Image (cartoon, grey):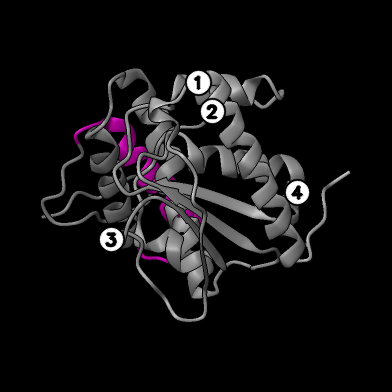
Amino acid sequence: MAEVDTAGRRGLPGLTYPERYLHELSLELTHRFDGTFNAETVERYVLESYTALLRTATVKAHLATRVIRFASDRLTALAQAKGAIAHDVPEVLFVCEQNAGRSQMAAMLTHSIAGDRVHVRSAGSAPAADLNPAVVFALEELGLDVSREFPKPLTDDVVQAADVVVTMGCGDACPIYPGKRYLDWHLDDPEQLTLDEVRRVRDEISVHIEQLLQSLEVGAHE
């Protein structure tokens, strides 16, 4: 028989949580998305997100924070795709292989340039454990705070929520949905590059972003 929580909700039959915070997160998100998703959907997303991030986790101390952010964002993306959450600004998804360099730079630079006029996400077809240190340095020297960022696996829900999907060397990993705009930016992978070369890639990405924002009729925020 499924356990009953303090609010009287039943979990999935036989469901066990490998970490206590996962159960608490499931309850919190079930309440937040009440009327949009049932408890079983939320629980599945939380456990899937935990399992996906656990594969590349090197520091368990960071895992809880990352799972909370990843599961919350995936459910938000799914709600956007279903039309349950308002879609007020363009949604742009940046995808590369490891989500440790190019796509992270693109997401952070886009947010820096456009602010809340565009909502950005990033993901990787084969995510690394952590961000590329040279990429972190190249972003921090522009005054950008990358302390909360981490590589995330590509999931179907974030693709469904996007208006524009920008790929950068991730092959055919990204699913194709009708009605979305797909772009492929040919950029060198920072993994084997020197810091100066990473800076060059960063600046190339900025040029691409300016062009993308113009096409979306989104200007830089003040």
Question: Mark 3 vs mark 2: which is more N-terminal?
Answer: 3
Depth check, mark 2 against mark 4: the one in front is: 2
Q: Which residue is mark 2?
A: 198
Residue depicted at 76% across the width and 61% down the height: 214
Q: Cα distance, mark 2 to mark 4? A: 22 Å
Q: Are marks 4 and 3 in contact (CB under 8 Å)?
A: no
Give percent across and percent down for residue 12: 19, 56
Q: Which quadrant holds the C terminus? A: top right
Question: Mark 4 vs mark 3: which is more N-terminal?
Answer: 3
Q: Which residue is mark 1?
A: 134
Q: Residues within 10 Å of mark 3 (few under 14, many from 20)?
A: some
What's the residue type where badge 1 is placed?
Ala
Q: Cα distance, mark 3 to mark 1? A: 41 Å
What's the residue type where badge 3 is placed?
Glu
Depth check, mark 4 against mark 3: the one in front is: 4
Q: Which quadrant holds the N terminus? A: bottom left
Q: Nearer the viewer, residue 33 or 123?
A: 123
